[in-house]
Image (cartoon, helix red, strand yellow):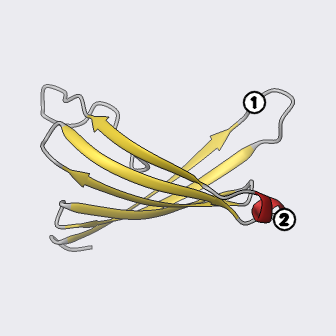
Amino acid sequence: MNQDISLSASFLGKYVANSPVQGELTAMLGLKEKLFLGATYRTSNDVIALVKVPISKMFTLGYSYDMSISKLSKYLSGTHEVLFIISSKSEKNKPINPSIRF
């Protein structure tokens, strides 16, 4: 978008035998490469709020909260995840396998 704000999106498809195919759409907004805020929607009727903060070129801290928006939501309280991300770098100092979700 500009030097201070970036926007990324991704789609992930999952298949497990004897289960329905599941899709996941994620959007991540980066602010000055110092704070990343995002949201994910899963076709299983879940929404996820994401935040991550790079603490160095190699390490990033993250947090996500998953909650159901299906009829089961009154029985489910959601899931908290705390992430510690270690990024490998290639020879050109770019991530080998970057992921916008984590």
Task: Answer with mark 2 or mark 1, whichever residue precedes in sequence.
Answer: 1
**Mark number for residue 16?**
1
Mark 2 to mark 1 CA distance (whole Å): 23 Å
Classify mark 1: residues with Cα within 10 Å, few (<14), some (14-19) or many (20+).
Answer: few
Q: Which image quarter: residue 96? A: top left
Which labelled disc corresponds to residue 71? Answer: 2
Image coordinates for residue 100, horizontal then vertical, percent: 39, 50
Q: Name the residue at 24% across, 62% down.
A: 35
Q: Amino acid at mark 1?
A: Val
Horizontal side of 58 relative to 51 (left or right) equals left
Q: Position of residue 18 (x, y in %)?
A: 87, 29
Badge 2 density bin: few <14, some 14–19, many ≥20, Cα 10 Å: few
Q: Residue at x 82, y 41 (%)?
A: 20
| 23 or 84, nearer to the observer | 84
Residue in the image at 13% along x and 34% along y: 93
| In front: label 2 or label 1 | 2
Looking at the rendered structure, the kind of residue marked 2 is Lys
Q: Which mark is residue 62?
A: none
In the rendered image, the vertical position of residue 96 relative to residue 49, given as above or below: above
Q: Position of residue 19 (x, y in %)?
A: 83, 35
- Residue sitting at x 72%, y 66%: 69
Helix, strand or loop at disc 1? loop
Q: Are marks 2 and 1 in contact (CB under 8 Å)?
A: no
Residue 72 at x, y = what percent? 82, 60
Q: Quadrant of the N terminus?
A: bottom left
